[in-house]
Amino acid sequence: MPAILEYEKRPDSLGKIILVVSHKKESPGIDLATKEGIPAVYFNLVKWRNRTGKSREEYMDTLGFFVSQYDPKLIVLAGWDLVLDENFTKHFPNSTIINLHPALLTESGTGEITLPDGSKSPIFKGQIEEVLPEVLKTGVTYYGCTVHEIKPNSYDEGKIIIQRVFKVEKGETIETLAKKLHKEEDLALVESIDKVLKNNSYSQL
């Protein structure tokens, strides 16, 4: 969120953040958006279902309808770990939806990644707390992040916009990997947002 805010304020930026949504109990992004005067809401799946008695599909439809009222041209998923289905995406026929994943991916989400030194890496899926231990356990020589367009009902697959890669040094720990990854994620998000907006002449995030 801080990186996207900094991008928004750049003279060459075409983006304007018009809404921040989180489905989690606590979110630094919501807190920051509130301080910046940006509309921000919590929309928790479990609490919504307990309160309404409705289905996950109805949650996605309601969420999509709500977000569509702000008419976003680009939707950025960063730290969002719910798979979006067609009940959500149907509300955005003319919008691009991109996702930040804390590992390198193929567009199909399957197979292997060829690393800069020619070695191979498996596809690491899941959230960062699940991915980092697997990276160290596997012993890959390079690691990184991916920003990709999403496909409804799919997880970690879609057209790749940007990937950033860095070398995994001997003696790396979860903490050192996380620090490197977060730096690359900030750069990848900003580069991807800028690329999508400028390629498509979008005016809002």
Image: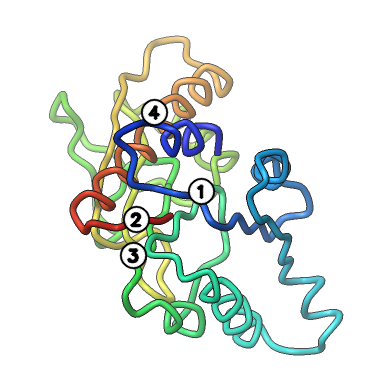
Q: Separation of disc 2 and disc 1 at Cα?
A: 20 Å
Instruction: Identify the residue at image location x=46%, y=27%.
Output: 136
What amino acid is at disc 2? Ser
Q: Separation of disc 2 and disc 3 at Cα?
A: 13 Å
Q: Earlier in the sequence, mark 1 or mark 4?
A: 1
Instruction: Identify the residue at image location x=21%, y=59%.
Output: 200
| Vertical side of 88 occupied by 108: above or below | above
Say whether residue 94 is left or right of residue 66: left
What amino acid is at disc 4? Glu
Say whether residue 122 is left or right of residue 182: left
Q: Residue furthest top?
A: 171
Residue 96, which numbered label?
A: 3
Residue 129, which numbered label?
A: none
Q: Which residue is mark 1?
A: 78
Q: Which residue is mark 2?
A: 203
Q: Nearer the viewer, mark 2 or mark 1?
A: 2
- Which quadrant: the N terminus? top right
What amino acid is at disc 3? Thr
Q: Separation of disc 1 and disc 4 at Cα?
A: 13 Å
The answer to which of 182 and 202 lies nearer the viewer is: 202
Residue 184, which numbered label?
A: 4
